[in-house]
Image (spheres, rainbow, N blue to C red):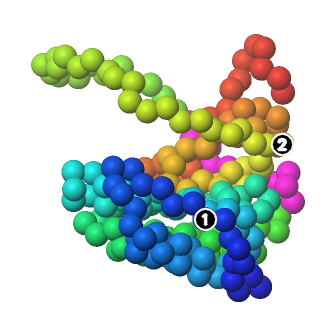
Amino acid sequence: MQTHNVDLPITVTGRHVSVTEAMRDHAEGKVASLHLDYPKIIEAKIILDVENSIRHKAEVILFCANHIVIEADTTTDDMYASIDETVHKIARRMRKFKTRMLKSHRPRHKEDHVHFHEEIYTAELPDEPEIEHEPNYVHRESFRVRPLFTDEAIMDLEMSERPFIIFTNARTNKLSVLYRREDGDYGMVSPEGPGIDS
């Protein structure tokens, strides 16, 4: 069991806030004290952010063995509380991940899917006043596309707070998008049609 993280590289950065030594020590101590027997933590990044002087956000990203990335964030009115809750989220996420790993002993080719028939309804809706809104480009994010089986993609998504994950389906070799549904289940989008390799 990995009972402690010896010489774990931890980077603490601040956005809109000057990171004090006390904040740095608290954040580093909480992450270094994570006792995870799987997977091994290779590097940790902690990002502290303050918005409007009242929203204190702590984000922790763990880079682990086997290309596993665990991330979580919390926003409260106190930075220390945000750090503590974020570390608790990561610990809970890892326990959930381990439980799923232990239950996942089925052959790779037997993937469980729930298929839903989708229809487009063109019923007329009552007219609503148009609101002029010019969309703005507000955020850009890069994703590392990895070959994964569907169950691995689900576990990867469960360990993050992203609404979706883009991956190459290791069974079909197609680019796929796995996303969270409002009912708590997962949906997957895969390309089909001419020019798409099977």
Closer to the camera, 143 or 190?
Answer: 143
User: Which is nearer the eye, 171 or 126?
Assistant: 171
In front here: 192 or 159? 159
Q: Residue at x 36, y 73 (%)?
A: 80
* Residue depicted at 82% across the width and 37% down the height: 172
Q: Residues within 10 Å of mark 2 (few under 14, many from 20)?
A: some
Q: Is residue 117 visible?
A: yes
Magenta span: predominant SS is: loop
Residue at x 21% of width, y 59% of height: 54
Which quadrant is the C terminus positioned in? top right
Where residue 94 appears, as percent x and y from the top left, is 62, 71
- Of residue 99 and residue 69, the one placed in the foreground of this image is 69
Mark found first going from the N terminus, 2 or 1: 1
- Per the image, the residue denoted by label 1 is 10
* Distance between the alpha carbons at the discs numbered 2 and 1: 36 Å
Of marks 2 and 1, the one in the foreground: 1
On screen, residue 85 above or below 160: below
Q: Whole-percent x and y of residue 160? A: 55, 56
Q: Is residue 177 above or below residue 15?
A: above
The residue shown at (40%, 74%) is 22
Disc 1 residue crowd, few under 14, some 14–19, many 20+, Cα 10 Å:
some
Q: Position of residue 53 (x, y in %)?
A: 22, 56
**Which residue corresponds to mark 2?**
171
Examine the structure image and report whether residue 115 is included in the region drawn in magenta.
Answer: yes
The percent position of residue 36, horizontal first and vertical second, equals 68, 78
Q: From the viewer's perspective, is 90 left or right of 171?
A: left
Q: Is residue 41 left or right of residue 21?
A: right
Q: Which amino acid, by three-letter code, is at mark 1?
A: Ile
- Which secondary structure, mark 1? strand
Residue span colored magenta: 107-117
Q: Residue 188 appears in which quarter of the rendering?
A: top right
Quarter assignment of residue 5: bottom right
